[in-house]
């Protein structure tokens, strides 16, 4: 049947564009109308007119949350990587302040840690990372928490006088707890004490202070903070 | 301070610049609305879940085609979702005889206005649908909101298919007169 039999001329054309926008045309006609509209500014304006006027009904589409897993599936389709990898790279933004060479060290250190065979899946999901630095100080550390009670520290730059030591502190809800003295220039592992683990997670802050050799004699930080950073999920 | 609409427009623009974080935020802000659209039209949850993934793939790929002057950002997103769901339905429906598509809009036709604010659009379409016979207004709503075909509409209103077509086209012409008045 012909469109022109029912309603002719400009009105017929406009009705056809409206039918096209509503989705009432069969597949062949729809594709044909789409081609005719494309590239004709007046028909495109006519189409946009109907799209925006009909959009006045959009409030009637109720919101329904899609299942959470879909976002990861979409990102995998688009970016070819599973969701955890994307968030992993997001966390690299944290390290922008670090020198390029230090960054390479950090990636190798973390990458190495991530391949440790004894980690199970649940510990992987609890892995945390922190870049420790402070303005005016050249002491930089990378801290990697393996999700299972061990914090691995890698010194990236900086040095301290021979009669001084760096002491590591955990700051959680205004409670400051010593985690021991940290040697400069080598990677070390620190077992996170149970009282720190109780409040451990994203938002916990790690800080390094400059203390007399052997660490603070009082159990409370006595020197300036030379590096600190908040732990975050990777 | 930015309006929510300007925010969404900004996120779409950043998607066009391949900003993945912006894409994620856009998804978080808009996926419930767009999922509501595809679910209402497809009426099948697993189909809708597949469709919404394809919709966001399209949004990422076509973000550079969004022109803020022509449509509001959320209307554009809803249109992408709605059109995708309709494409799925259309592919299953019978194809009628090939028709000759003649689309001549005279030069003196008043050029349609650009997009207005959402609340204004809603009041306008409601008012103009209100001037139609209630059955015909509901047929337009059924086509827009539920993706109903002419066949389904003819069944619902128990009229022959061609009568339904003529009905609806005349209603659309009246609707246009009201909307441009």
Image: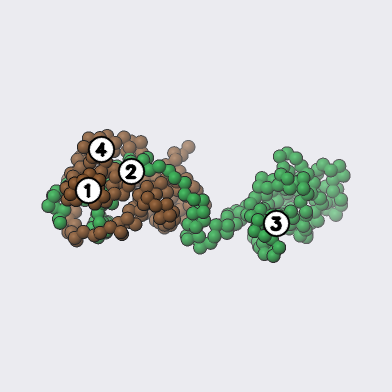
Chain colours: A green, B brown
Tags 4 and 2 both on a single chain: no
Question: For the residue labelled by badge 1, is the local secondary structure a helix, a strand or a loop?
Answer: helix
Between A136 and B133, the one lying in front of the other is B133
Label 3: chain letter:
A
- Which residue position is annotated with label 2? A55
- Which residue position is annotated with label 4? B129
Tags 1 and 4 both on a single chain: yes
Identity of the residue drawn at 40% across and 55% down: B47
Identity of the residue drawn at 14% across and 53% down: A4
Q: CA distance from mark 3 to mark 1?
A: 64 Å
Label 4: chain letter:
B
- Residue A147 x, y percent position in the rendering: 69, 54
Q: CA distance from mark 1 to mark 4?
A: 19 Å
Tags 2 and 1 both on a single chain: no
- Residue B91 x, y percent position in the rendering: 31, 59
Q: CA distance from mark 3 to mark 4?
A: 62 Å
Between A136 and A195, the one lying in front of the other is A195
């Amino acid at each position: 049947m012909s469109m022109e039999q029912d309603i002719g001329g400009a009105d017929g054309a406009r009705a056809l564009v409206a039918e096209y926008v509503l989705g009432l045309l069969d597949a062949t006609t729809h594709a044909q109308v789409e081609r005719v509209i494309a590239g004709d500014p007046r028909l495109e304006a006519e189409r946009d007119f109907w799209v925006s006027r009909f959009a006045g009904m959009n409030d009637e589409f109720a919101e329904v949350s899609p299942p959470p897993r879909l976002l990861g599936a979409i990102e995998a389709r688009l970016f070819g990587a599973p969701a955890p990898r994307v968030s992993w790279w997001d966390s690299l933004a944290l390290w922008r302040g670090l020198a390029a060479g230090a960054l390479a060290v950090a990636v190798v250190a973390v990458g190495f840690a991530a391949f440790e065979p004894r980690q199970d899946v649940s510990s992987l999901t609890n892995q945390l990372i922190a870049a420790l630095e402070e303005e005016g100080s050249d002491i930089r550390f990378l801290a990697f928490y393996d999700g299972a009670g061990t914090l691995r520290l890698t010194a990236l730059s900086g040095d301290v006088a021979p009669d001084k030591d760096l002491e590591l502190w955990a700051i959680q809800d205004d409670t400051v707890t010593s985690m021991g003295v940290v040697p400069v220039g080598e990677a070390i592992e620190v077992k996170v004490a149970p009282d720190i683990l109780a409040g451990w997670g994203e938002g916990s802050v790690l800080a390094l202070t400059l203390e007399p050799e052997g660490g603070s004699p009082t159990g409370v930080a006595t020197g300036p903070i030379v590096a600190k950073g908040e732990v975050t999920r990777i | 301070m930015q309006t929510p609409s300007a925010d969404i427009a900004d996120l779409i623009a950043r998607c066009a610049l391949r900003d993945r974080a912006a894409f994620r935020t856009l998804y978080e802000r808009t996926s419930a609305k767009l999922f509501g659209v595809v679910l209402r039209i497809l009426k099948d949850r697993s189909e809708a879940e597949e469709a919404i993934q394809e919709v966001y793939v399209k949004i990422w790929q076509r973000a550079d085609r969004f022109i803020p002057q022509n449509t509001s950002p959320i209307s554009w997103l809803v249109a992408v979702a709605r059109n995708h769901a309709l494409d799925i339905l259309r592919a299953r429906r019978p194809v009628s005889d090939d028709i000759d598509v003649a689309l001549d809009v005279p030069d003196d036709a008043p050029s349609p206005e650009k997009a207005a604010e959402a609340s204004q659009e809603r009041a306008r379409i409601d008012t103009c649908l209100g001037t139609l016979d209630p059955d015909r207004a509901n047929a337009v709503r059924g086509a827009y909101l539920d993706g109903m075909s002419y066949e389904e509409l003819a069944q619902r209103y128990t009229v022959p298919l061609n009568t339904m077509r003529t009905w609806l086209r005349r209603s659309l012409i009246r609707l246009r007169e009201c909307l441009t008045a």
